[in-house]
Amino acid sequence: MVLASDTDAPKLTAHFVDTAKADSIIVVSAPPNIKNAVWGGLMSAGAIGRSARGVVISGRCRDITEHGNLGFPVFSKGHSTLGQSPFTRPSAIEVPITISQDDFPAVTVNPGDMIVGDKDGVVCVPKDLVEKVVELADLGRKIDALCLQDIITGKGVQASFKEHRGKTQL
């Protein structure tokens, strides 16, 4: 997305939701500090029609109840009652975007990267690291299952971490 007043940025010939690929996660980057939403319920309906799996918005969305009723996962930095037009407009698709969030390092999302989100947040896994991340995540789940089993039976958290994670966590 760019500011609607940006006359130098390219203009799309189709609505960006209409270009979504089946099984894709749509990632939208809005200009910093804008107050309007860049995604609403009709866009979720359109994304469902294209068999997209969800949307991650570095910006705001609206129509929260509608997304929930549609069963379409929407992750955004915030919400707004203001619609996209006349404040912002889409300018490019299938391009790398960089997302900044408060005190966290900026993350560049490239087409084809894996996006994973749940109630705790969203992460981007670069496509060339997917296999390694899956391997490490699987190992982490197995180690945490061992820790959980120990902790539930009364072993201390610190002792369990030291045994299974190989270090002491305070």
Image: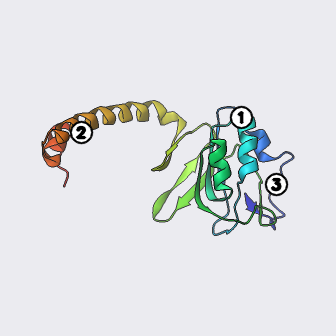
The residue nearer to you, when weighing 94 against 137, is 137
Helix, strand or loop at label 3? It is: loop
Q: What residue sits right under mark 3 in the picture? A: 10
Looking at the image, tell me whether mark 2 or mark 1 is earlier in sequence order.
Answer: 1
Hey, which quadrant is residue 1 in on the image?
A: bottom right
- Mark 1 element type: loop
Q: Residue at the location (19% across, 37% down)? A: 164
- Residue 133 relative to residue 161: left or right: right
Q: Are marks 2 and 1 in contact (CB under 8 Å)?
A: no
Q: Is residue 8 above or below residue 43?
A: below
Which amino acid type is shown beneath numbered disc 3? Pro
Which-is-in-front pick, marks 2 and 3?
Answer: 2
Query: Residue 4 is drawn in which quadrant?
Result: bottom right
- Image location (x, y in percent) of residue 107: 53, 52
- Tags 3 and 1 touching, CB below 8 Å: no
* Closer-to-camera residue (63/101): 63
Residue 166 visible in rendering: no
Q: Position of residue 134 (x, y in %)?
A: 42, 32
Q: Is any atom of residue 108 visible in this view?
A: yes
Label 3 crowd (10 A; few <14 / some 14-19 / many >=20): few
- Which residue is tagged 1? 21
Q: Position of residue 105 (x, y in %)?
A: 47, 58
Relative to 7, is 148 above or below?
A: above
Helix, strand or loop at mark 2: helix
Residue identifier under label 2: 148
Disc 3 to disc 1, how far (Cα)? 21 Å
